Image (tube, helix red, strand yellow):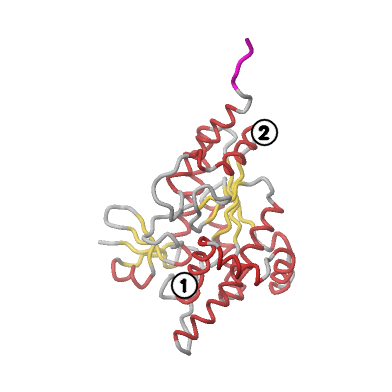
Amino acid sequence: MPPTTAPDTLPTRLSMAILNLLLPHHRTTDPGPASPERFPHQLRQVADFVRDDAPVTFTLPAFPCKSPNPAKVLGHLPDQGERLSLGFLNTLCNEIERIYPPGARMVICSDGHAFGDLIRVPDEQIDAYADELRTLIGQSGLTRLSVFDLRDVFGDLPHDTKRAHLHKSYAPTLDALRAEVRADANTLALYRGITRFLVEDTADHAGTRSALQRECRQRAYGVIQRSRAWGDLIADHHPRSVRLSIHPQPVGAPKFGIRLLEAPDAWTTPWHSAALRRTDGTWTLMPRAKAVELGRLIGYDGRPSHFEQG
């Protein structure tokens, strides 16, 4: 009697094991733990790599640039928050290799240039941030990681020209996006989260608070348009990759939300905050203005790095 085991049993089993390594770090606002079976999209993608005996490729649009608000961050270059996050992502890839020998690689899709004009961060600072990410990856021996940004697509074209090409080729229309915000709770949450970040990141607004909020609501639509465009460009350049996100994602969504470091807010990232090492040795993220009240500033390689309690 022929065996009844389906030919995809081993790829499916390995895919579930790989998803189990990701699940403790799932960034979501959904309640309770979730099992790998609730992520069919990611399971299919991972199984494709397993069947080919190829490294699993993850793409993560993230690490754009530091917030322009000095009350939130220590400067415009990566610091301990980024070092810890990059180390975590590399370790995650190494853990995958322990159960799946071809391993995994993580393409960090640094998206600062996609919307630098909308978040009011100079392109020179965005370049410096992404260049320092590459330096940190090389110096720290994080061999599973690489950085991809608009320079890899459009070369040395002016930054405004790159953004124009990106927007024209991939961005959804403003009307379509507004309709989605009205109809979809997750898109509405994203819109509100980005609006909040834009308000918080504006440190020098001379007008009223209500005027700033109106302006940031408009800019938030532009940021989402460019982010969507960047995501579609990534899909074109890395068509088989498993898409991760630093934003909270519902269970079973096409993108898998991933938490880089502990923070009290599901939206907090290393580039919108400073890292604080607690007295018990654990790390968390918080605005610089709060961290300075709880700990002392520590330098690294000639620059402010993080805070330590005690």
Determine the secondary structure under disc 1.
helix
Q: Residue at 56%, 64% (x, y): give it.
A: 183
| Magenta highlight on residue 27 | no
| Residue that protrudes farthest toward the top in the picture | 1
Q: Residue at 62%, 28% (x, y): give it.
A: 8
Q: Residues within 10 Å of mark 1 (few under 14, many from 20)?
A: some
Residue 9 visible somewhere in the drawing: yes
Question: Overall secondary structure of the magenta stretch?
Answer: loop
Residue placed most toward the observer, 42 or 261: 42
Q: Does 304 sit left or right of 278 as displayed?
A: right
Which residue lies under the disc numbered 1?
196
Which kind of residue does numbered mark 2 sit on?
A: Asp
Residue placed most toward the observer, 78 or 224: 224
Q: Where is residue 165 drawn, in percent x and y? A: 74, 68
Q: Where is residue 310 drawn, in percent x and y? A: 25, 61
Q: Is residue 284 above or below residue 113?
A: above
Which kind of residue does numbered mark 1 sit on?
A: Arg
Q: Is residue 173 above or below residue 83?
A: below
Kindly identify which numbered label has been placed on residue 295: none
Q: CA distance from mark 1 to mark 2?
A: 43 Å
Residue 127 visible somewhere in the drawing: no
Determine the secondary structure under disc 2.
loop
Which residue lies under the disc numbered 2?
52
- Disc with the residue nearer the chain's start (1 vs 2): 2
Q: Residues within 10 Å of mark 2 (few under 14, many from 20)?
A: few
